[in-house]
Image (tube, rainbow, N blue to C red):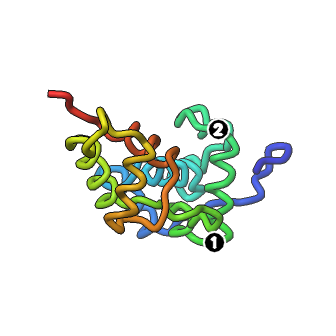
Amino acid sequence: METTGRKIYRVRLEADERERLKGILDGGRGSKERRRRAHVLLLADEGRPGGGLGDAEIARVLEVGASTVERVRRQCVMEGLDAALERKEQLNRKPRLLDGEGEAKLTMLACSEPPPGQARWTLRLLGDRLVELEVVESISDETVRRTLRKTPSSHG
């Protein structure tokens, strides 16, 4: 956060921290978000030649919002380097109903022959069959639809 040009959260990295962040960028490993955060911290480091850049300049160079730069800088100062690099766990998020195995079973089922007397699978039939197979305790038609929609299928 910058107030009239004065930085409230000043990032001062140790040499080993700087090397670690450079390794994240050079190695190309890790998520795009993790690499972006590492880049923000390297540019904000006041120990680099010429000092750290301001939030607005970092945001312009990396094409991110100034609030992103401020948030990463604040996390680094208040919670440490690891906290600034990693995403916070989202505590209010529900776990996924279908994991990868469940999605695979749904896809296989949808690609199979429909039950006798049916011309095709419906969302409700697919959901009912997943319950019968004890893949899930219950599932809505909408969850079945969303899962199938994101799964690429081959009609050949």
The image shows residue 47 at horizontal and vertical percentages of 55, 59
Residue 62 sits above or below residue 44 on the image: above
For the residue labelled by badge 2, is the local secondary structure a helix, a strand or a loop?
Answer: loop
Query: Does the CB distance between marks 2 and 1 fall below 8 Å?
Result: no
Most foreground residue, 40 or 112? 112
Q: Is residue 31 visible?
A: yes
Most foreground residue, 54 or 38? 38
Mark 1 is surrounded, within 10 Å at the Cα level, by few (under 14), some (14 to 19) or many (20 or more) other residues, namely few
Which residue is found at the position 49% from the left and 48% from the top?
143
The image shows residue 60 at horizontal and vertical percentages of 60, 32
Q: CA distance from mark 2 to mark 1?
A: 21 Å
Quarter placement of the C terminus: top left
**Marking on residue 65:** 2
From the image, tell me which residue sits under label 1: 79
The image shows residue 10 at horizontal and vertical percentages of 68, 60
Which residue is found at the position 44% from the left and 61% from the top?
18
**Amino acid type at mark 1:** Glu
Which residue is found at the position 58% from the left and 71% from the top?
80
Which residue is found at the position 46% from the left and 42% from the top?
146
User: Which residue sits furthest front?
Assistant: 117
For the residue labelled by badge 1, is the local secondary structure a helix, a strand or a loop?
Answer: helix
Most foreground residue, 95 or 139? 139
**Amino acid type at mark 2:** Gly
The image shows residue 150 at horizontal and vertical percentages of 39, 39
Mark 2 is surrounded, within 10 Å at the Cα level, by few (under 14), some (14 to 19) or many (20 or more) other residues, namely few
- Say whether disc 2 or disc 1 marks the residue closer to the N-terminus: 2
